[in-house]
Amino acid sequence: MLKNQCEEYLEQKAWAESAVLCCLHLEKLKLFCLDHHQPACVICRDSRIHTNHTMRPIYEAAKDFKNKLQKLLETLQYKLNKFKNIKEDCDKARKLIETQAANTEQQIKEHFKKLHQFLEEEEEARISALREEEEQKIHRIKKEVEALSRETAALSDTVRATEEELRTEDVFFLKSCKAAVERVKQCSQLEDPQLPAGAVIDVAKHLGNLRFNIWSKMNDLVSYSPVIFDPNTTHITLSEDLTGVREGEGVAEGSEGFDSGCHSWDIRIDWNYGEDEVSESIWAQRIRVSLDWDRGELSFSDPYTDTHIHTFTHFH
């Protein structure tokens, strides 16, 4: 008889759980205890175990917790998008590194073609350094992409699981929503991804003043330029040795400069009138730029008439 009663009780309990009924009182679960964080029936509310507990209608509690979880999910989705975007940037950076390495290698070869045969050893040394940097930086990017892929997969799984939680019935949702909230909070605390600093090839290091670096061997064939442009800072087409501009509009940052003395340049500016393909006329203008580092003056003038145009003054 006792065995039969136990089996009957277990059957009623299973039926009550499947029918969204209280397993203790077989009443419909209409309330949610905020203290115990579990559904309850009207009899549970008046029971000793829920004395002085805060009760809410189950639909209100479900709505509140869904709104809370939805806000956390939006934050997590925003972070997931950041991870995806940075991963895309890493993929683009990897391709850029390969392109930069190939282009830089070609330019290095062009420089060495203008030199004598005895410079072959110097050429190979520089290409080796470039290849080493390419390998190191591609390896670094690959490791970063692998890490981002793992984090992205974990975040995607959490987002997918949370979305499934939000689609469940209120009672079942409330039974597991606390864990879901904690899971989303934990994922939301991940640091935002960033593209590694110095990820791309340092082209200026390989091409900047390349001829000057071997000037001690071929002093009569090369000239030194103390200021070079960094191609990573501009879209302007630069000369092979990064000391001049071929075409384009914009600003290029110099990777080296002066720290003393007086210096001067004559700059030619070409103005084209008409359509891009058929230019009606070209007007060339020259401007002299003079730098007096010690006095902190950068002056512009007309080299033909020696007429002063403007001077910038900076005290250092």
Image (cartoon, rainbow, N blue to C red):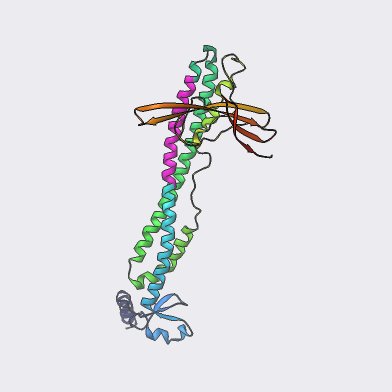
Q: With respect to residue 197, does 164 lie above or below?
A: below
Q: Position of residue 91 (x, y in %)?
A: 42, 41
* Range of residues picked out in magenta: 86-110
Query: In the visual, does 76 lie left or right of 122?
Result: left
The quarter of the image holding the N terminus is bottom left
Q: 30 or 132: which is nearer to us? A: 132
Residue 180: quarter of image: bottom left
User: In this orientation, which residue lies closer to the viewer: 117 or 225?
Assistant: 225
> On screen, 249 above or below 69?
above
Task: State the residue in front, 159 or 116.
Answer: 116
Q: Is residue 140 left or right of residue 279?
A: right
Q: Quadrant of residue 27?
A: bottom left
Q: Is residue 225 left or right of residue 12?
A: right
Q: Position of residue 73 (x, y in %)?
A: 41, 61
Q: Which percent across, then down, holds residue 207?
A: 52, 26
Question: Which residue is at 63% across, 27% downward?
Answer: 263
Does residue 11 sit above or below 160 in this rendering?
Answer: below
Please state, as top left, top right, bottom left or bottom right, where the C terminus lies in the image. Answer: top right
Vertical comparison of 44 with 92: above or below: below
* Magenta-span inclusion, residue 123: no
Query: Would you say the magenta stretch is mainly helix, strand or loop?
Result: helix
For this rendering, which residue is in front, 60 or 12?
A: 60
For image coordinates 30% across by 74% down, the residue present is: 18
Q: Residue furthest top?
A: 117
91 magenta-colored: yes
Figure quadrant of residue 295: top right
Residue 86 position within the rendered picture, expressed as x and y whole percent measured from the top left? 44, 47
